[in-house]
Amino acid sequence: MNLDASIAEDTTPRKETPHGFTLVVLQSSSLCNLNCRYCYVPGRMAAEKMDNETLDAAFRLTVGAEDRRKVTHEFLWHAGEPLAVGLPFMRNAVERCVDIALADTRFQFTVQTNGVLVTPQWARFLKEWNFGVGISIDGPHFLHDANRRNWANEPTHDKARRGLDILLNEGCNTSVLAVLTKDSLDYPDEIFDYFLASGTPGLGFNIEEIENQNTETSFGANPMGKHNKDAHQRRVRAFFDRLFERWWPHRDKIQIREFVDVMRCASAFRADNGFSRSPDEGRMLGIVTIMRNGKVATFSPEFAGATSSAYGDFVVGDVHTMSSLNDILASPVYARLKNDIQSGITACRDNCIYYPICGSSFISNRYFEHGTFLQPETFTCVAMRQTVAEAAFAGLAHEAKKGHAGQSPSAYQG
């Protein structure tokens, strides 16, 4: 799943979330100040904002609902550039949430930003409300600026990096999300050195993928063709092999989400061979996306704004007419989605040896790559689960043979 044009995924590694958790993706606006080459979000020039009525309805269905008291809600502002709506909008939204929330409810705020609009005022606000902040930077300027440009086709690296520095200097809970393109794979050392020097404590990667409005990537329109798949995955493997080698001695300074996730899942599997990862996107109401007009999607955030005659454009409700989030479960669209998505998950479980460390992630990629949920393997899952896992296990085995770090590497092997 790609929370930045794809959460991605959440750039801060965390423990497997219990079923009493819902990620609520809030699209304050689809407007974005950038025109990144690989972005999947539709309507990025539309300036309409989520209004107060929609905000209040969203919060009443979540932190204001008696039947949701035992659920922890994480509100992720995403799917457009959230900071483009302005600081007064965001402060108003947060305060409305707090006013509506029932006593003793558990919730937190996060935001995924391209960083260009970050100011000290924004950083102080985000710090004040303890936001988790994911900032999208693809690495050194020659990689970042090749794809992440504004509408005037100007480079954006320097402004994004300034935003990162402001956030870190203010003490915000900040991590970075970087998109890997075909060209990025040639520069593991440059990418690692850049982020290590930046001081960011957490780093995650999304690989450029076919999704929603992004119908062709630097890897081609059919990256899973036999020749393409093998050639691409050899390069992905070489990238992560080298990245692990560079990261391991510095793992106390910077967490790389992909390696941490694999090792955490492998360790859990060693302790209990019945363990398997449980991604939020595959669970009932694990992720709920509320679009700026109040329309609701579920499972993967990338479905928001997508078109599909088979699945009713992925709309499973409207906050203005719903009395409970459980109304989603009665939607005919939800029933069709759940049935087909579960069939794909079952196929993963029955046929893929990587299932325990993946749990059948990247659900939206199946639809956008294959036009169906029933073909489970995708370019993204091969690259970001299978190939990353192979690189991580090979790296751990190498470290164990060297005898470094005591039993730490071998504790993850299985």
Image (cartoon, rainbow, N blue to C red):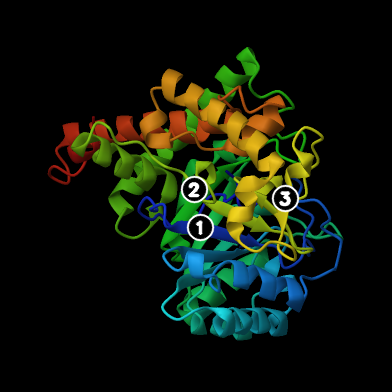
CA separation in Å, label 3 and label 2: 16 Å
Q: As drawn, is 324 to the left or to the right of 47? A: left
Quadrant in the picture for the N terminus: top right
Tell which residue pokes out farthest to the top in this image.
226
Tell which of 223 and 374 is nearer to you: 374
Tell which of 305 and 8 is nearer to you: 305
Identify the disc placed on residue 304: 3
Identify the disc placed on residue 314: none
Estimate how packed mark 1 is, as few (under 14), some (14 to 19) or many (20 or more) residues with alpha carbons within 10 Å: many
Q: Amino acid at mark 3?
A: Ala
Tell which of 128 and 396 is nearer to you: 128
Question: In the structure shown, which secondary structural element does the residue marked by tag 3 occupy?
Answer: loop
Pointer 2 residue: 280
First-in-chain label (1 vs 3): 1
Q: Residue at x 84, y 55 (%)?
A: 43
Q: Residue at x 68, y 45 (%)?
A: 331
Q: Are marks 3 and 2 in contact (CB under 8 Å)?
A: no
The image shows residue 23 at horizontal and vertical percentages of: 53, 58
Q: Amino acid at mark 1?
A: Thr
Q: Amino acid at mark 2?
A: Asp
Tell which of 363 and 319 is nearer to you: 319
The image shows residue 47 at horizontal and vertical percentages of: 85, 68
Pointer 1 residue: 22
CA separation in Å, label 1 and label 2: 8 Å
CA separation in Å, label 1 and label 3: 17 Å
Decide if residue 343 is in sight here: yes
Picture quarter containing residue 214?
Answer: top right
